[in-house]
Image (cartoon, grey):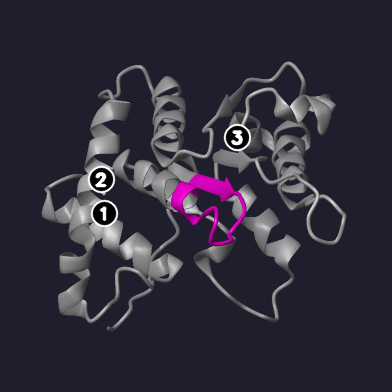
Amino acid sequence: MATTSRRKPPASKSVFINCPFDDGFMPILRAMVFAIIAAGYHPRCALDATDGAEVRVGKIAQMLGECDWGIHDLSRVEVGDGGLPRFNMPMELGLHLGARIFGEKRHKRKRALILDADRHRYDQALSDISGQDIESHRGDPDEAIRCVRNWLSEHRPRNADPLPGAAALQADYRQFQAEIGALMAPRRLDADDLTHSDFLFAVRDWLKERGADA
């Protein structure tokens, strides 16, 4: 399948996703990606491009700088097999907040959605952000869609058309999941083994088939 280069989307429509990328979290990530695209925005994350020669934190900082929106999931700030907690997600949240506080004028418009599996769990691990609004997806893809949709909706321009409701997007996602296999088969892609870029293509292709704006 031939690929063509695409211009980077504008910062005002770009949503950086800071979350785990393991198989256990993938249902939440993909639900969030679907909600972002269905709402007319562009998801960005460290999975967008793989380059072994690129310094990871540099790539993340660049992406954060190119996005006015950031979703930061703290549900995996927990002790791993090695007896140490995972600090990647809090660090990236810190980069986002630092850019908003100390960055150039345009960075001060950055908005963040902070997610956790339990709304009050972060108090024990990251008390410095106490007082900020934390949303909980409870490990449920439907709840992740609701959180993302409502956050994007709350900060839309006043003259913008409203987004479809959370229940509508949740239903759309279930339909997409039911139809993705047939959609990808002519392209010789296995719906159960899609890369991140293939999944982005599948969501946009499905929305295009339905006549939605993606």
Q: Nearer the viewer, residue 121 or 205?
A: 121
Mark 2 or mark 3, which has the lower sequence index? 3
**Residue 95 in sight:** yes
| Residue type at the position of mark 3 | Ala
Q: Is residue 27 magenta?
A: yes
Residue range highlighted in magenta: 15-28
**Residue at which label 3 appears:** 117
Q: Which secondary structure lies at badge 3?
A: loop
Place of residue 116 in the rendered image (x, y in percent of width and height, measured from the top left):
62, 34
- The quadrant holding residue 184 is bottom left
Query: On the picture, is 150 further left or further right than 207?
Result: right
Local SS, label 1? helix
Q: Name the residue beneath numbered marker 2.
A: 174
Q: At which x and y percent is residue 141?
A: 42, 41
State which tag comes first along the sequence, 3 or 1.
3
Circle 2 — which element?
Answer: helix
Residue nearer the viewer, 5 or 171:
171
- Is there a contact, CB below 8 Å, between mark 2 and mark 1? yes
Q: Residue at x 69, y 54 (%)?
A: 61
> Is 69 located above or below residue 202 in the figure?
above
Q: Which residue bears the numbered disc 1?
A: 177
Point 26% across, 49% down: residue: 214
User: Marks 3/1: CA distance?
Assistant: 23 Å
Judge whether residue 41 can be spotted in this image. no
